[in-house]
Image: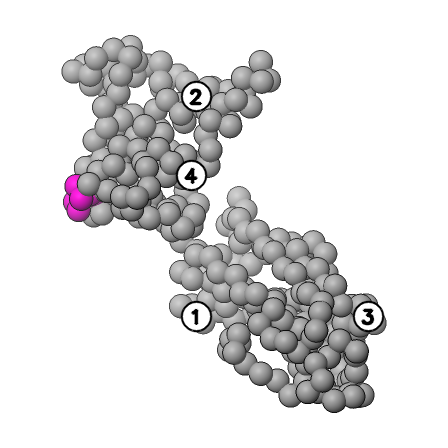
């Protein structure tokens, strides 16, 4: 796929980047996640407001779908997907780095005397469109694939016992292969027990992991994170930041705000647990 927003065609193409149609939209949204089986799951939401193009799709004169392209692994697939909501699965091992999704509608047969009052006047009264030609182009979507970002956030932490830490408190040492969270014996045992109770995990998220993430972000923002980038946990941390378009070294952002984004609003999870009690 070598499509860009500046390309022009000898026939009208419905796109937000062209004025070939005086009105109508090809609206597209995507969600992605990784299944327990290690597949990439893409959920597409495709909506077409042009009745003529919709008729071509419903009569199988045209098809809807999207390109999935990963240049780093030479993966380039045109995936057919219906209008509305649908899910498709892809082999995650064939993807790494930046992945581009480009929604398209293309012809399944030649179109003779293709005409619409919504065409720009430059196309005349009608045009001919060849089989396999693009007749609608959606916006480009990008995301990154790194197996590390799909690891649970708590996998980068290690809870340890340290008698020098005051009771009821924790200390953070990120200059290890895993971020060390240490506590004295009694506190350590309570935290370890809480990890095994599903209802208590949101409390740990707010009381332990969020302060730890804030501490790490603060170090990175203050220029004290140079040695941290070589640690094994950093790649997981950075992949999760990249996935959410977060720059952890941005001094204009508060560590509290960034930590809440990275942990996906942990307070909401705690409130949800309490409301069920």
- State which quadrant residue 118 falls in: bottom right
Which mark, residue 55? 3
Q: Are marks 4 and 2 in contact (CB under 8 Å)?
A: no
Tell me where the magenta segment starts and ends, as one range: 223-228
**Closer to viewer: mark 3 or mark 2:** 3
Q: Residue at x 64, y 88 (%)?
A: 10
Residue 271 visible somewhere in the drawing = yes
Q: Secondary structure at mark 1?
A: loop
Magenta residue check for 59: no
Q: Position of residue 268 (x, y in %)?
A: 51, 28
Q: Nearer the viewer, residue 152 or 21?
A: 21
Q: Secondary structure at mark 3?
A: helix
Instruction: Kindly report the distance in space between the C-alpha atoms of the residues bearing marks 3 and 4.
Output: 43 Å
* Residue carrying label 1: 71
- State which quadrant residue 52 falls in: bottom right
Instruction: Kindly report the distance in space between the C-alpha atoms of the residues bearing marks 4 and 1.
Output: 29 Å
Label 2, residues with CA under 10 Å away: few <14, some 14-19, many ≥20: many
Earlier-in-chain disc, 3 versus 4: 3
**Closer to viewer: mark 4 or mark 1:** 4
Q: Residue at x 19, y 41 (%)?
A: 222
Instruction: Kindly report the distance in space between the C-alpha atoms of the residues bearing marks 2 and 1.
Output: 42 Å
Q: Secondary structure at mark 2?
A: helix
**In the figure, 40 relative to 6: above or below?**
above
Instruction: Kindly report the distance in space between the C-alpha atoms of the residues bearing marks 1 and 3.
Output: 34 Å
Instruction: Kindly report the distance in space between the C-alpha atoms of the residues bearing marks 3 and 2.
Output: 53 Å
Magenta residue check for 225: yes
Label 1, residues with CA under 10 Å away: few <14, some 14-19, many ≥20: some
Which mark, residue 203? 2
**Closer to viewer: mark 1 or mark 3:** 3
For residue 63, side relative to residue 263 (left or right): right
């Amino acid at each position: 796929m070598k499509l860009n927003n500046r390309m022009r065609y000898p026939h009208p193409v419905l796109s937000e980047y062209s004025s070939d149609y005086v009105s109508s939209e090809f609206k597209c949204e995507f969600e992605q996640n990784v299944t327990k089986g290690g597949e990439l799951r893409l959920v597409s939401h495709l909506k077409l407001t042009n009745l003529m193009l919709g008729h071509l799709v419903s009569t199988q004169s045209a098809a809807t779908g999207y390109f999935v392209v990963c240049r780093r692994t030479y993966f380039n697939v045109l995936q057919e997907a219906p209008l509305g909501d649908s899910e498709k699965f892809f082999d995650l091992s064939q993807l790494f780095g930046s992945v581009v999704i480009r929604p398209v509608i293309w012809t399944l047969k030649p179109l003779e005397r293709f005409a619409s009052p919504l065409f720009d006047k430059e196309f005349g009264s009608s045009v001919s469109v060849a089989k396999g030609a693009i007749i609608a182009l959606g916006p480009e979507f990008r995301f990154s694939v790194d197996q590390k970002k799909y690891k649970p956030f708590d996998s980068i932490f290690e809870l340890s016992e340290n008698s020098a830490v005051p009771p009821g408190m924790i200390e953070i040492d990120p200059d290890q292969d895993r971020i060390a969270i240490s506590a004295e014996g009694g506190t350590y045992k309570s935290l370890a027990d809480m990890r095994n109770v599903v209802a208590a995990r949101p409390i740990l998220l707010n009381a332990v992991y969020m302060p730890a993430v804030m501490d790490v972000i603060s170090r990175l923002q203050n220029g004290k994170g140079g040695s941290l980038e070589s640690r094994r946990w950093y790649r997981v941390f950075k992949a999760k930041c990249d996935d959410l378009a977060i720059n952890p070294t941005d001094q204009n952002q508060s560590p509290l705000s960034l930590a809440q984004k990275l942990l996906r609003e942990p307070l909401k999870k705690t409130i949800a647990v309490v409301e069920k009690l």
